[in-house]
Image: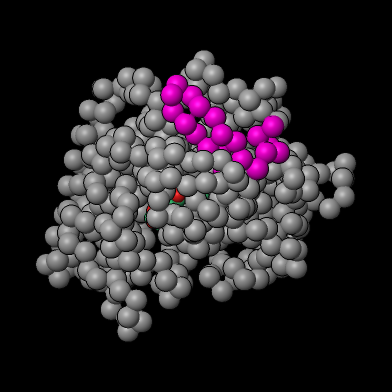
């Protein structure tokens, strides 16, 4: 790719002159933990440093990522004991919080609903929910301004709610679940990097009132899901297949890949994990995609032309996804520039050696998709929005370099689901609307456990055609 004046360079975080993990800066982590990484971190293959007596190792190249996430994953735990302790009251003993044998069992039990054969049904829910949102927007006066981050969160909550639980949940129960999850999410965001970084003094910053509110929300969410499960067990099953029903009934296929039914409590915990893992991530990515598409006229023209030509006004189905390569490339490039999960951490349980550095047990291994995706030695114009790099025919980035869904054994279970959802929602909404950033709005980045536009993303709705 040649340097081109017309390339759109979207907002990024400021880079301090020096690598700045001082105790003072650590507090800045609470707002945006990406702003402590100096230029050096966008060029280095690895970094080893100590902070408040804790040893850290930054994996910043495909070989170091491969070592930790694949080759020696057996000695790198996903959750530090502190993190597990903090998350367990909210998420139970589920897939997300566990390591070792329990994780292996749950991963096997939770995988069948994400197989290809279930995707067409889920895809219809995705397009249908996006169409309903387009209808809502169409009722608003021309030129209305909406908070796109909020709108995308509303959309993905509806999609994941309908795919996990089905349509037979009453509006009141659905509202209880969504509200409960919102409080959950706030609390989890509060946990942010204090636990990830194993910095004990920061744990005092948790707000006990918020935790109490979260406990109440947890109880409400549990009550609603337990009721749905009881109805299911009494034979009152939804017409369509749901993620929860596959967890409860097991994998009935003859593929023999496993998928034993889960008992009620385990199924409930995993349903919660799926809601949590699949909701905010996709919403943030979609919001960033609208921002990027608005900022780059060339890409916008190409994406809209593709969507109009392929769909001719129809609501897209799963089959259309293969015919929307540019829309897909827009979503993949969005995940490169703004990976919804910008930091992955592991903790060494045993000794290792990486790039000549001895790794001692207890070392926290950091991998930042944010840094890897903008690495100056790996990408052309790393800070530019250039969807064409993901078009068929362009060389595919190394799978240990481009890792929006992580990589290796603990790769995101919903990766295909999330990609399909992103493409179908973009295509359905873009058929009818263009979203424009108000001229006086400056987009900024907020980075807690996920990466999102700070303070939301106001955009003006403009009807097309
Ligand atoms: C654009 C959307 C998404 C992104 C960027 C994303 C990203 C990720 C990442 C980075 C991880 C690994 C975290 C780590 O290793 O520390 C992960 C794990 C996971 N994700 Fe996603 N995710 C997305 C959508 C979804 C959806 C839609 C679902 C489910 C419906 C889902 C379910 C999960 C589950 C269950 C795990 C835990 C897997 C395990 O530990 O074995 N994700 N996701």
Residues 310 and 280: in front is 280
The span picked out in magenta is 40-59
Residues 313 and 255: in front is 255
Q: How many callouts does the rendering have?
A: 0
Q: Which residue ends up furthest to the bottom in the rendered image?
A: 254
Q: Which of the 4 quarters of the picture holds residue 322? A: bottom right
Residue 437 image offset from top left, x and y in percent: 67, 36
Would you place residue 237 above or below residue 461 in this image? below
For the point 40% across and 40% down, the residue is 361
Is residue 446 located in the magenta-colored stretch of the structure?
A: no
Is residue 47 located in the magenta-colored stretch of the structure?
A: yes
Residue 40 image offset from top left, x and y in percent: 69, 32
Relative horizontal placement of residue 328, taking residue 456 as reference (left or right) = right
> Can residue 453 be seen?
no
Q: Main secondary structure of the magenta part?
A: strand
> Can residue 363 be seen?
yes
Residue 309 image offset from top left, x and y in percent: 71, 68
Q: Which residue ends up furthest to the left in the rendered image?
A: 234
């Amino acid at each position: 790719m040649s340097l081109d004046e017309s390339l759109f360079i979207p907002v990024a975080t400021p880079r301090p002159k020096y690598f700045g993990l001082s105790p003072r800066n650590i507090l800045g982590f609470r707002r945006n933990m990406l702003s402590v990484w100096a230029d050096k971190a966008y060029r280095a293959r690895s970094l080893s440093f100590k902070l408040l007596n804790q040893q850290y190792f930054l994996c910043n190249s495909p070989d170091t990522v491969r070592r930790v996430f694949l080759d020696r994953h057996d000695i790198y735990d996903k959750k530090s004991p502190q993190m597990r302790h903090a998350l367990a009251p909210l998420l139970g003993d589920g897939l997300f919080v566990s390591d070792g044998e329990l994780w292996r069992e749950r991963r096997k039990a939770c995988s069948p609903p994400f197989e290809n054969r279930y995707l067409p049904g889920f895809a219809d829910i995705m397009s249908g929910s996006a169409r309903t949102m387009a209808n809502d927007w169409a009722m608003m006066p021309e030129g209305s301004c909406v908070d796109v981050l909020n709108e995308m969160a509303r959309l993905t909550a509806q999609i994941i709610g309908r795919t996990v639980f089905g349509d037979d949940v009453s509006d009141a129960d659905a509202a209880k679940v969504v509200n409960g999850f919102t409080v959950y999410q706030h609390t989890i965001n509060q946990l942010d990097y204090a636990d990830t970084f194993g910095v004990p003094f920061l744990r005092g910053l948790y707000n006990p009132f918020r935790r109490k509110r979260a406990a109440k929300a947890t109880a409400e969410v549990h009550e609603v899901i337990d009721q749905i499960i009881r109805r299911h067990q009494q034979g009152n099953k939804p017409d369509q297949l749901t993620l929860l029903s596959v967890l409860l009934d097991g994998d009935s296929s003859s593929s023999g890949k496993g998928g034993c039914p889960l008992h009620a409590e385990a199924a409930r915990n995993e349903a919660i994990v799926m809601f949590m893992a699949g909701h905010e991530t996709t919403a943030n990515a979609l919001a960033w995609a609208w921002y990027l598409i608005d900022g780059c006229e060339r890409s916008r023209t190409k994406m809209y032309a593709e969507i109009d030509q392929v769909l001719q006004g129809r609501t897209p189905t799963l089959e259309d996804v293969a015919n929307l390569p540019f829309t897909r490339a827009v979503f993949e490039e969005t995940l490169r520039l703004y990976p919804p999960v910008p930091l992955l951490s592991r903790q060494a349980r045993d000794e290792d050696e990486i790039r000549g550095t001895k790794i001692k047990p207890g070392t926290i291994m950091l991998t930042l998709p944010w840094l890897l995706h903008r690495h100056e030695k790996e990408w052309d114009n790393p800070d530019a929005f250039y969807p064409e790099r993901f078009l068929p025919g362009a060389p595919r980035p190394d799978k240990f370099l481009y890792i929006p869904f992580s990589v290796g054994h603990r790769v995101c279970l919903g990766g295909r689901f999330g990609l399909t959802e992103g493409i179908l929602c973009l295509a359905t909404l873009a058929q009818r609307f263009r979203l424009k950033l108000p001229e006086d709005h400056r987009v900024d980045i907020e980075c807690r456990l996920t990466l999102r536009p700070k303070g939301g993303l106001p955009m003006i709705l403009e009807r097309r055609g």
